[in-house]
Image (cartoon, rainbow, N blue to C red):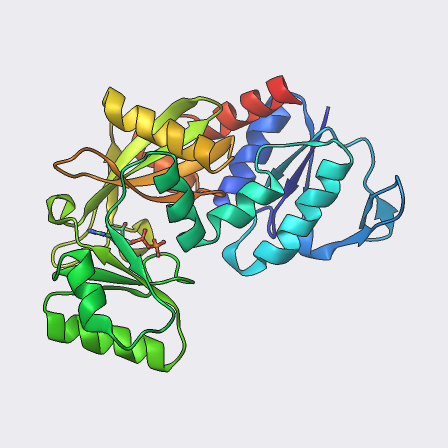
């Protein structure tokens, strides 16, 4: 079997671990930067050229596409899909997951619970938007933000109005979301592979911080999901059309609330916190599917 991992650097923790586990199972594995691939489109013969060679006999790909290269990454995945190569993240799934607003719309349509969320076309009537969400405190999120950057907690209506207006002024699109106080600086991340949760962790933010991203200094600890949380995570990945995903959820009185579904979840935090060999679970799944 030949596996290609689409990643910008072989030394990145997740890429390294996936390569290591694939090679343990004697799978020929190449790490290839999708940004260096050339796509040749002609009738009945979609090709991917890497350096000066056509990539042939590839049976499976694992896309590890960063947020800054979604467009080109999706095009490369699509080219492999046209060749009937198995991918654990479809091009459509990747594009869906990278659009925060569209993701929330898809998830809500699937009957999943989410924090109440509002979106406008840079409306300057922020007061009524805030009212429709249920008032403050509320969370304002840049649509293009990642790793907690551009996620703001506004405690008062005045503060919320100022932040929304400032973002509108610079034409930065934001969503406005009910603040889930029960989660208070914590959230959960579940790794879904196939129709199973293979690992989960609870992330806790440092004192005084409400965002529990690992990149913001949060600590992860192993979490055993209850059946409601597990079902929500699996359903969220399925709704997004992702066979493998990292599903972020908030704890709330009304059960787990889906925050985001990640198409390229990092493996370092979850492997360390859960003690599970997540990279091996990925590879075994891909091997069984390809
Ligand atoms: P990013 O995609 O940039 O990581 P998130 O939407 O995941 O942004 O938000 C970052 C963090 O902020 C989350 O991990 C969570 O701890 C906190 N958070 C986000 N939304 C809410 C919310 N509606 N209520 C409470 N906390 C939230």
> What residue is drawn where x is 44% and y is 51%?
102
Left or right of 282 in this view: 145: left
Residue 172 picture quarter: bottom left
Question: Which quadrant would residue 117 be assigned to in this image?
Answer: bottom left
Camera-side residue of 222 and 100: 100
Q: Residue 71 location in percent, x, y?
A: 61, 57
Residue 243, compared with residue 203, is above or below; it is: above
User: Is 282 positioned to the left or the right of 221 in the image?
Assistant: right
Residue extending farthest bottom: 169
Residue 17 in view here: yes
User: In x, y percent, where is residue 179?
Assistant: 17, 54
Residue situated furthest top in the rendering: 288
Residue 256 or residue 218, whichever sits in front: 256
Residue 275 appears in the figure: no
Q: Is residue 45 above or below residue 136?
A: above
Q: Quadrant of residue 114?
A: top left
Going 47% across and 47% down the picture, which residue do you hit?
Answer: 97
Does 288 sit left or right of 235 as displayed?
right
């Amino acid at each position: 079997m030949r596996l290609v991992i689409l990643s910008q650097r072989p030394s990145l923790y997740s890429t390294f671990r996936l390569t290591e586990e694939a090679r343990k199972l004697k799978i020929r594995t190449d790490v290839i930067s999708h940004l260096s691939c050339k796509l040749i489109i002609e009738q009945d013969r979609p090709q991917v050229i890497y350096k000066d060679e056509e990539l042939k006999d590839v049976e499976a790909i694992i896309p590890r596409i960063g947020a800054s290269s979604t467009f080109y990454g999706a095009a490369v995945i699509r080219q492999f899909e046209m060749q009937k190569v198995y991918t654990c993240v479809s091009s459509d799934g990747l594009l869906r997951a990278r659009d925060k607003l569209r993701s929330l719309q898809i998830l809500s349509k699937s009957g999943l619970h989410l924090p109440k969320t509002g979106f406008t076309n840079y409306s300057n009537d922020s007061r009524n938007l805030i009212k429709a969400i249920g008032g403050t405190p509320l969370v304002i999120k840049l649509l293009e933000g990642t790793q907690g950057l551009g996620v703001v907690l506004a405690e008062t209506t005045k503060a919320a109005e100022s932040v929304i207006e400032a973002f509108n002024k610079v034409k930065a699109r934001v969503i406005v979301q009910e603040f889930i106080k029960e989660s208070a600086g914590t959230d959960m991340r579940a790794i879904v592979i196939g129709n199973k949760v293979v690992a989960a962790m609870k992330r806790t933010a440092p004192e005084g911080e409400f965002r529990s991203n690992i990149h913001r200094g949060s600590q992860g600890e192993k979490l055993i999901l209850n059946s409601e949380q597990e079902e929500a995570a699996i359903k969220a990945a399925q709704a997004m059309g992702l066979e493998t995903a990292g599903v972020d959820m908030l704890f709330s009185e009304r059960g787990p609330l889906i925050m985001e579904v990640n198409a390229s979840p990092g493996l370092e935090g979850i492997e360390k916190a859960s003690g599970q060999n997540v990279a091996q679970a990925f590879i075994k799944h891909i091997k069984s599917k390809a």
